[in-house]
Structure formats: C-alpha cells, structure tokens
Image: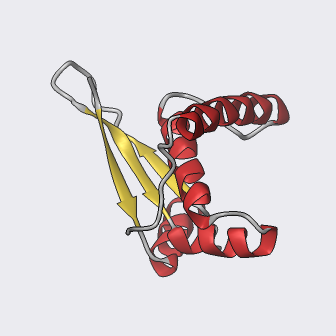
Amino acid sequence: MRDVVLHFVTEAKICELHGEHFDDPSLTDCITFPIDLPGPDCDVLGEVFVCPTAALLYAKENNSQPYRECTLYIVHGLLHLLGYDDIDEIDQKKMRAMEDKCMAYLEQRSLILTPPK
C-alpha cells in the first residue's frame, strides 16, 4: 500500500507552485508531484495540492457544487499519480472517462466531500 499526501492550499500558494514548477503563475485547480523514489522502502506515491478557491470560482461560474469540484480535483490528482495524463486529446478522453467512473462510484456511496455540520 502506498500513501498520498493531500494538501488544501490557498490561491496564492497554488499560483506560486504553478509558476515555480510549470512557468505559469495563473490559478489552477490542482497540482501533483509524484515521488519517484526507487525501491520497496518508499511508501509515498506522491503529493496532491488542491485549491478550494479554484473550486469555489468554478462552481460559481458553472452553477455547480464547490465540494463536488474539490472531490473531482482530488480524483484528478490521484489519477495523475497513477499514470493518467491529460496533455493530448486521446489522454484527456481517457482521463475524463476514469474521472467520471470514479466520481460515479463516490457519488453512489455518498463519499463526495460535504460541508461540515
């Protein structure tokens, strides 16, 4: 079993990471960093940085739910760590199909993030 480190970060932090690692300081939803340490001693698959502000903005502009968007960003990041990519159109279709499958699974089991009660 491998662990994943999940970070919820501010808009400023995600923009800083995006600029530093991808030469694009614009707001983005999530960024992943795989841990490429060889051998059985490495238990960490990677890190996923999610920006809830991006989810709030997207949800407001698209009449959707911000907690569902955050859940999707987590799924998206995990899929990147598992080898999925979204650079070209064919890979994007594969990524979207797997995102849909994962989100349907989570929704059927009421595992989508929800506001605190």
Q: Residue at x 48, y 39 (%)?
A: 78
Give residue 9's quadrant in the image. bottom left
Q: Residue placed farthest to the left in the image?
A: 41
Judge left or right: residue 27 versus residue 31: right
* Front position in the image: 11 or 101: 101
Q: Position of residue 6 (x, y in %)?
A: 36, 52
Q: Position of residue 13 (x, y in %)?
A: 45, 75
* Front position in the image: 71 or 32: 71
90 is higher (above) or lower (below) than 116:
above
Q: Residue placed farthest to the top in the image?
A: 40
Quarter of the image containing the C terminus?
bottom left
Judge left or right: residue 14 versus residue 46: right
* Front position in the image: 98 or 60: 60
Q: Residue at x 43, y 47 (%)?
A: 33
Q: Is residue 93 visible?
A: yes
Q: Position of residue 68 (x, y in %)?
A: 59, 56
Q: Residue at x 49, y 67 (%)?
A: 20
Q: Is residue 25 visible?
A: no
Q: Position of residue 37 (x, y in %)?
A: 28, 31
Q: How many marks?
A: 0
* Front position in the image: 73 or 25: 73
Quarter of the image containing the N terminus?
top left
Tell me how the rendering is colored: secondary structure
Q: Residue placed farthest to the right in the image?
A: 89
Q: Residue at x 44, y 58 (%)?
A: 49
28 is higher (above) or lower (below) than 53:
above
Q: Residue placed farthest to the front in the image?
A: 117
